[in-house]
Image: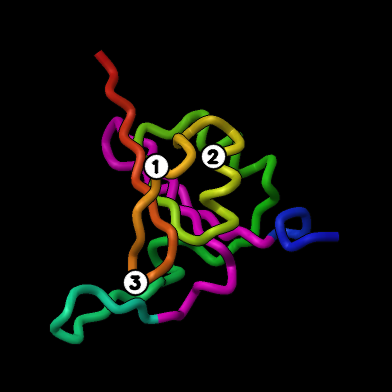
Amino acid sequence: MSAEEDGGFVMRVHRIRAEFLVAACDAELLGRELPVGDAGHTVKVTAQFYGERKVSREELLWALQRATIANLLGPRTLRLAEEGGFIDPGGAGELGGVPHAEIFAMLG
C-alpha cells in the first residue's frame, strides 16, 4: 500500500464566515521548518493549520471539491490536486523548496 493510499496526507478544514478553507500537506512535512527568502526566515508547517488527522486521497478530493480556498503543500498533495483537476500541471510554486499551491474559487 502506498503512502497516498494509507493516509499519507493530513488535512484540516477551516470555516471562516462563508469560506471553506482546506489546508492539506504530505504528512511527513508536519513540524518541518521551511526556509523563506534570503534573510534566514523560516515558516513552520504546523498541525494547528494543516491538521494532524491523516486522510485518504478520496477524503482530500471530496474536501477540495467543496473548498472555496485551498492551501496545499508537498509533492504528493500537489500531484493529487493535479490529478483531480484542481491545479494545472506546472501550476504550483514552491515554499522552502517544497511544492506549494493556493487555490481561490472566484464565485460570482
Q: Please state if 57 lies on the left or on the right of 74 as rendered.
A: right
Q: Residue at x 53, y 30 (%)?
A: 85
Q: Which mark is residue 96?
A: 3
Taking the view exactly as shown, the residue that stands out farthest to the left is: 39
On the image, the x and y values in percent for residue 73 come to: 45, 58
**Vertical placement of 45 versus 88: above or below?**
below
Q: Nearer the viewer, residue 21 or 26?
A: 26
**Which SS type dominates the magenta stretch?**
strand
How far apart, in angstroms, are the residues tagged by discs 2 and 1? 9 Å
Please say which color scheme the image uses. rainbow
- In terms of sequence position, does the residue under pointer 2 or pointer 1 come before the other? 2
The magenta region covers 8-32
Q: Which comes sooner in the sequence, label 2 or label 3?
A: 2
The reply to whether discs 2 and 1 touch (Cβ–Cβ < 8 Å) is: yes
Q: Amino acid at mark 2?
A: Glu
| Residue 16 as seen in the image, left or right of residue 78 | left
On the image, the x and y values in percent for residue 98 come to: 43, 66
Residue 54 in magenta stretch: no
Residue 14: in magenta span: yes
Going by the numbered disc 3, the residue's amino acid type is: Gly
The local crowd at label 3, few if under 14, some if 14 to 19, many if 20 or more residues have their Cα within 10 Å, is some
Name the residue carrying label 2.
82
Q: Position of residue 39 (x, y in %)?
A: 13, 83
The answer to whether 87 appears left or right of 68 in the picture is right
Secondary structure, mark 1, is loop
Q: Which residue does the image show at 48% across and 29% down from the upper left?
A: 66
Q: Which residue is mark 1?
A: 91
Q: Quadrant of the N terminus?
A: bottom right
Q: Residues within 10 Å of mark 2 (few under 14, many from 20)?
A: some
Gap in angstroms between the C-alphas marked 3 and 1 = 17 Å
**Numbered disc 2: secondary structure:** helix
